[in-house]
Each structure stands twice: as C-alpha cells, then as structure tokens.
Image (cartoon, grey):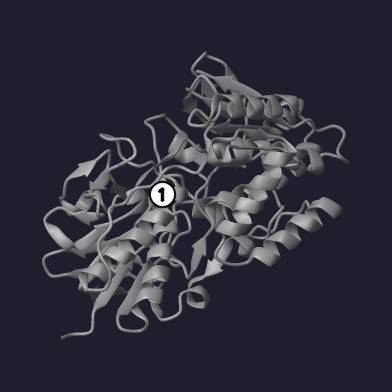
Amino acid sequence: MARPRIVIVGAGFAGFEAARTLSRLSRGAADIVIVNPTDYFLYLPLLPEVAAGILEPRRVTVSLAATLPGVRVLLGEVDGLDLAARTVSYVDPDGGRGSVGYHRLVIAAGSVNKLLPVPGVTEWAHGFRGIPEALYLRDHITRQIEMAATAEDPAEREARSTFVVVGAGYTGTEVAAQGVLFTKALTRDRPGVHPRWLLVDTADRVLPSLDARLATAADEVLRERGVEVLLKSSVEEATMEGVRLSDGDFVPTRSLIWCVGVRPDPLVADLGLEVQHGRLVVDEFLTVPGHPDVYAIGDAAAVPDLTRPGEITGMTAQHATRQGKTAAHNIAASYGRGRRRAYKHHDLGFVVDLGGLDAAANPLGVPLHGFPAKVVTRGYHLLSMPGNRVRVAADWLLDSLLPNQGVQLGLVPAAAVPLDAALPQGVPGAQLRKESARP
C-alpha cells in the first residue's frame, strides 16, 4: 500500500489545526503537506494591535516549520484543484508552477475581503486581513498625522487627520478603538492636530453579532474616546478627496479602512461543486458530497450547525480551529485509526479588545466589560496562540510601561495592499497594481 499523502490547502486557523492534529495522530506514518503562500500561521485577532504599534508583526506570526513537526510546507498560492486527477496546482513565490498529488485533500483556503459595488472603494480603500495591510495602516496613520502637523491649509490638515472605518463588526470596532488611542499618542506633542475617527455601519448597533449589553458597552467606550459612531449609514462613494455617506454628507479624508467582512476564497467557486453563500457544501463529517476523500473546513466550507438545525456554522476562528481537529480525526478514521465523528460545537463566547484597559467579552455566556473583560480577552488570546506567548506578553508589558514609538518604516507601499487582492499577505513577486495617486 502506498504511503498516504494528505494535502492541506491553507494554513489559517482550520488548516493549521488540521495539520497539527494529523501530525500527532499519524506519528510519521503519513506524508502531510500544507500549501500556503507564507511560512507562518497568522493569529489574526491580534492584528489591530500590530496596526496600533502595540505588538511587533512577528509576534502574531507563528512559524509553520517550528510548530508542525513532520509536516512539509510548500510555499505557494493554490490556483487549481483537479479532483479527478487528485492533484493540487500552485504558483510559488518566484512565479514558478508546481503540483502535488494527494490521497486525502483538506480545503481550508479561508476567506478574503468582502467587496461591495461602491464607486471608488477598490481604488481608495484598504482592507485589513494580513500583516502587510497592518504594517501599511500603521505607517499610513503615522504619516498622515505627521503631514497634518506641517500642513498650512486647515482643510488639508483636517482631511489628513480624519480616519473612516467602514464596518462595525469585530475587526472594524477593534481597529477604531485601537486607532483612536494610537493617534492620541501621536498628537500628544502636536497641539494643532485633532484626530477624528468615524465608524460607519449599516447595522443599528456596533458588534451586531454580540450580546446587546456588550455591544452597548463597546459603543460607550468608542463614543467616550471621541469616535463618531454612524449607524444605519454607509459609504456611497469614495474619491481621492474623501467619502460621501448615504445621508449625503461628504467627509474629507485620506484614510478609508474597509472592514465590512469577508467572503470565501474564490478558489472554492471555481471547483464547480455545490456552494452555499459562496462556501463549499459539506456534510456533518466535513466531507464534500460525492468526493469522500475531500474535506472542506473553515471559512471555505458551509458546515451544518448541528446545534442550530438548518443553519451553517459562522466564519469564526473558534469554529475553524475545531473543524480542523475534527477533519484530522475523520481522516485518521478513514485509515482505520479511530472512528468518524460529526462536527458539533457550541459557541464558548467571544472577546473584543478595545485598547487601553477596556474590552468586551462573554465567556460561556457571562457578559463582561471593562478591566475584567480585558483580563479574560488577553488570557484567551495567550491560550489560543500556538506560539510566541512570552513575546506577546512582553510586548503588552512594555506597552503599559513605555510610550508608543510613532515612526513610519515605509516597508509596505499602498500598491502592495489593494483592497481587491485575493491574498492580502501576497506571494512575493506577484504583480502589484500601480501606486496610488493619493498623496
């Protein structure tokens, strides 16, 4: 019998956990291959703290080679899956093409920025899905504040110090909450600059998927810090000079941060298989109907939610991680080791870090806000991270003792992080769009 080869597409929460569990279960009896554009697992929930200068970028990246013993990492962006020939094709960082065969396939391709048909957004907005975007935003905010401080035109000064965040979900709320503290630190010695932050969403409250009491607490924190929370509102048009809102108001700004949500990786739609809301349909065992050797998990999969009949699981890290583990056990069962198990998971609650000493959390359904929620939030992140815990804790400690370093490094140009990119962290050598004309 040929040595089993299990190929995993993507090293996000789902793919990483599937690889880690398979590595432990196989004990060297199978070839486990993970195909990913980068050599690290990105702990996405802490990305806003990278943009705010609290954490260094390597703190939220965990080496695949160091944490997945016995797993072969292929650097590349998957651009094709041939289920009949059982092959995965990909493009490596230098633009070369490659392919790898499989006996079992795990599709954990994840998600990309959700785009809406709003004029000018793809040209003038930037998303928030990867390390390059966080580094770009950190530099961009710093640069705008520095240029606002030297601008002689009051209108230019106001535009450069105005930041519009679209989307009041977890990411948008955290970006706005962390961002306003960051700009306050940057303007401490610049009395002529007054940062303005706007958080825009079509919903009737921030954090619409969270407990209403926690959403209210988060809303109060944002407003106390001076964030203008514009609910039941949207961006109608984005231009080089600013954005026009649905109420007709025009907001002069050089910073439009797009956090309206995510959509499944387009790779899924190209397979010609049944999808639901853009996600690949699977059964409760996470296998693709008609393809018993193919599994799909995480944001790319429409997994039946057995705790809520008729619905599918949410696109959250909590589900993705547990689906990765379940898929690994079911693959092992397909080789006679253990038994198959249906995926079923009750939400354990959510955490939202609002910067400073504030947070909102509902662990096991218990609503918390303020400092108690902050302790729970940071403890949850440290426990959930597969590595770098000491380094992250050290950065948090230093941030509480030392002032933020408000400098821009210029490592990521605007052209490297277009909103319409399917892959925010990018494959080195991939073609970049032309440099933005915005100054």
The picture places residue 310, in percent across and down from the top left corner, at: 25, 34
Residue 365 point in image, percent of width and height: 54, 36
**Residue 156 position (above or below residue 52):** above
User: In the picture shown, does residue 127 fall above or below 135?
Assistant: above
Asked whether the viewer can see residue 402, the reply is: no
Residue at x 60%, y 29% (from the top left corner): 214
- For the image, the number of numbered tags is 1
Taking depth in this image into account, of 283 and 220 the one nearest to the observer is 283
Secondary structure state at the residue bearing disc 1: helix
Question: Which image quarter is the N terminus in?
Answer: bottom left
The quarter in which the C terminus is drawn is top right
Q: Residue furthest top?
A: 247
Residue wearing tag 1:
319
- Image quadrant of residue 22? bottom left
- Residue 236 seen anywhere in this rendered image of the structure: yes
**Which residue lies at the image location 37% right of the left edge and 53% below the top edge?**
110
Position of 289 relative to 82 (above/below) = above
Residue 368, picture quadrant: top right
Q: Quadrant of residue 437?
A: top right
Residue 33, x across and y down, in percent: 34, 75
Q: Is residue 51 above or below residue 260?
A: below
Residue type at mark 1?
A: His
Of the pair 222 and 75, the residue shown nearer to us: 222
Q: Position of residue 228 (x, y in %)?
A: 66, 23
> Few, some or many C-alpha atoms within 10 Å of disc 1 (few <14, some 14-19, many ≥20)?
many
